[in-house]
Each structure stands twice: as C-alpha cells, then as structure tokens.
Image (cartoon, coloured by chain):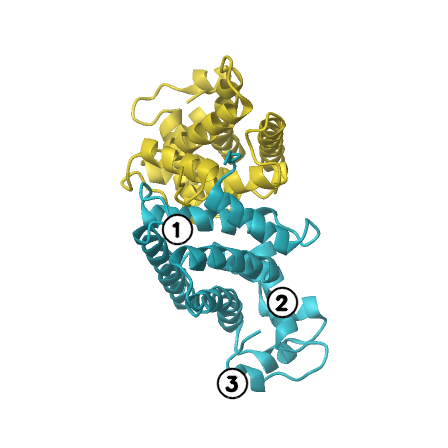
Chain colours: A yellow, B cyan
Amino acid sequence: MALPPHDRQRRGRPGHDLDAVLAAAVALFNERGYDATSMDDVARGLGITKSSVYHHVRGKQDLLRMAIDHALDGLDDAMTQVRGLPDATALERLETLIRLSVLVLTSRLPYVTLLLRVRGNSDVELAALARRRAFDHDVTALVKAAQAEGSVRPDVDPATAARLLFGMVNSLVEWYSPGRGNAGTLACTVTALAFDGLRTRHL
Amino acid sequence: MALPPHDRQRRGRPGHDLDAVLAAAVALFNERGYDATSMDDVARGLGITKSSVYHHVRGKQDLLRMAIDHALDGLDDAMTQVRGLPDATALERLETLIRLSVLVLTSRLPYVTLLLRVRGNSDVELAALARRRAFDHDVTALVKAAQAEGSVRPDVDPATAARLLFGMVNSLVEWYSPGRGNAGTLACTVTALAFDGLRTRHL
C-alpha cells in the first residue's frame, strides 16, 4: 500500500500497524456507514485502545482519505502503466486499462467499495470525486483516440462508452467475492464482453 | 404506476395523491437515506400535514415497499414481455430484455436508485432482495439458453455474464439524467455494446 512518508513514520506496532487500522476502519465504514462509525468502534474492532489508533492517524477523516486514496492510486497506477506501453494502439491501451482495473477492484475490493459510495459530503470526499472525474475524463479520451484510429465503433458517444465500461467494471463491488473464481479469468471475461460482446462471432 | 387495489382506494386528493407522496418520499430516501427520513419530512416536503400523508399510506415501511415494488414491477414486466415474444430466439429475448431494462431504469430512475441501495435491513428489504435474485436467476437462464442455441459465446459463465450485463445497465443510476440524451438512443448503445462490443467489426 503506497502511503505518504509522514504516515509511514507513524507505523510500527506489530499486529496493529497502519494497514491493519485502515482495513478495520474500511470494513466498518462499508458495513455501518462512515458517519455511524466512531474511532472507538475502530479501536474496539482491533482490540486495541483508542490512543493506539491515534498513534497511527490523526482522526476519522484521515482514515477515510487514506482508504479512498488507496483505491484511487490503484486506478491511477493502471492508467499510468497503460500510457507507458510502448507502441500500443489506443485500443490496446483501453483493453489493458479495463483488464488492470478489474484486477485493482478485486485486490482492493473494500477500498473501491468505499470510494464508490462517496457522495461529496466533506473536503476529503470532494477531492475524491474530483480525482474520479479526472480518471473518467482520461478514459473518455482513450475511447476517442481509439475511435480516431478506427479501432472502436464510431457510433457510440465516447463519454457514454467510458461510463458503461466502468459501470460493468465497478459492478464487481456488488457481487464479486474472492471465492467466486479467479480474478484473472474475470478480468478476461469483462474485457471480452466489453470489446467483442456476448454474441457468437461467425468468422 | 401499478398499485394494489387497497392502495388505489386511498388515493384521491388532487395535488398530493399517492403518486406524489411516493415520489416525494423516494426523493428524500435517496437524498438523506431511509433511516434519516421521517414521515414529518415527507409531509413537509409536500407542504401537507402528516395526517394527510397517513390518509394515503400506513407508514414509512409502506412507502418503501411501494417504491421498491414500482422498480421491481417494471423489471418483471420487461421479463414477462420478453417471454411472450412469439418465435423469438433466446438471444433476441435477451437483447430485448436489456433494451427494455434501460427504458425502465431511465423512466423510473429514483425508484431503481432506491432499489439498488437496499441491503436487507427489514422484511420489506429482504423481500426486495429475493425478487432481485429471482430476476437475476431468470437472466442467467436466458444467457444459458442463448448459449445452448449457439448465439452467445460459450466461453463466459452465464451467471457472470448476467451480472456484468446488469452491472452496465444499473450503472445508469449513477450518471444518467433525463437531460443527458434520449433514453431510446441510450438503450440501443447499451445493447450494441453488450452484444457486439466496442471493437470495430471488419466484415
């Protein structure tokens, strides 16, 4: 998990380091809602004192910000990776992005679940929505580029296509569980459906 | 809106009949959450007294049940329509179901938004989840039938395909607004993407 240097310094206690605190908090936020979860609940969930939790983070907003950033960093890293592909077509970049995004969602499931519930009720949430919009904008630009090179059908609106692609990807938070098949297989299924559709091709 | 006979009898007051009460309640449930909304809030939103609201419904659970049923009835009606198509292949039924479902979502958007947030916190919510599961089961059966007739690719798991199809359709509640283009065009875009994919076909 990529954390800022300041937060890294706060780590250390074996058994309940920052990652564990964050994971426990996210589980509670997803289960009961952010507002209904107290720092006491987080501490109790870990079986540690509240002051031990404050050893790692400044407060609840801090936990929310780090959790959401963990989800967004995964998606941004995927975009960076895709942009760095040498000699790739826009279509290949887009296909790789969808595949990588499925892997990010399956491996950071509770964090992305939390991200997708954010409605803009605080500065932390507003910042997250702005990052989501920037990501959506980049996906739309990729769809446009693929249309310009002739590899994606010209009859769909690029912004709508971007939303539908991630509508399909993001739906994973509603039904995916690690026990439900291999994440790699799922990534291939999503990509196949998105780019080639369900219909049998008669070549 | 299809309502049970008992509820129909309760209607009547011009300007704030049952449909208006329901619409106001659903808007508040979606904005603040079901738990945080009181019958007082619903009455205040309509500019009527609480007893006028109780003229139409027994209580808040009643409003939730009717709102959720309105969404589910739309989807079930689509399934019934699709099943009644004479001489249609399973693929044609599935394509029509996706198209009709987009139209149900766009025309009953706040009701479906509410439905998709239901987590099973009461008998009303548990009943809604059971109906959703039955619907998913029927969609999976349609995908299977289309695979059996050879019109849908055999390399995807039918239940996963059903979830991804409706993941795409249901994502509309996150971003669709009536101002954002024609619902019919959107229904065609979703169906095209689902069955033929984004990739340009070179025939």
B183 and B112: which one is in front? B183
Q: Is the residue A116 above or below the residue A56 in the image?
A: below
Q: How far is the residue under mark 2 from the one under mark 1?
A: 30 Å
Number of the label disc, if any, that sits on residue B162: 1
A33 and B1: which one is in front? B1
Number of the label disc, if any, that sits on residue B6: 3
Q: Residue at x 62, y 73 (%)?
A: B19
Amino acid found under the numbered disc labelled 2: Ala
Number of the label disc, if any, that sits on residue B23: 2
A81 and A193: which one is in front? A193
Q: Earlier in the sequence, mark 3 or mark 2?
A: 3
Q: Earlier in the sequence, mark 2 or mark 1?
A: 2
Residue A58 in view (yes/no): no
Quadrant housing residue B45: bottom right
Q: Earlier in the sequence, mark 3 or mark 1?
A: 3
Q: Is the residue A194 above or below the residue A16 in the image?
A: below
Q: Secondary structure at mark 3?
A: helix
**Mark toward the viewer: 3 or 1:** 1
Q: How far is the residue under mark 3 from the one under mark 2?
A: 19 Å
B41 and B29: which one is in front? B29
Q: Position of residue B182 (x, y in %)?
A: 67, 53
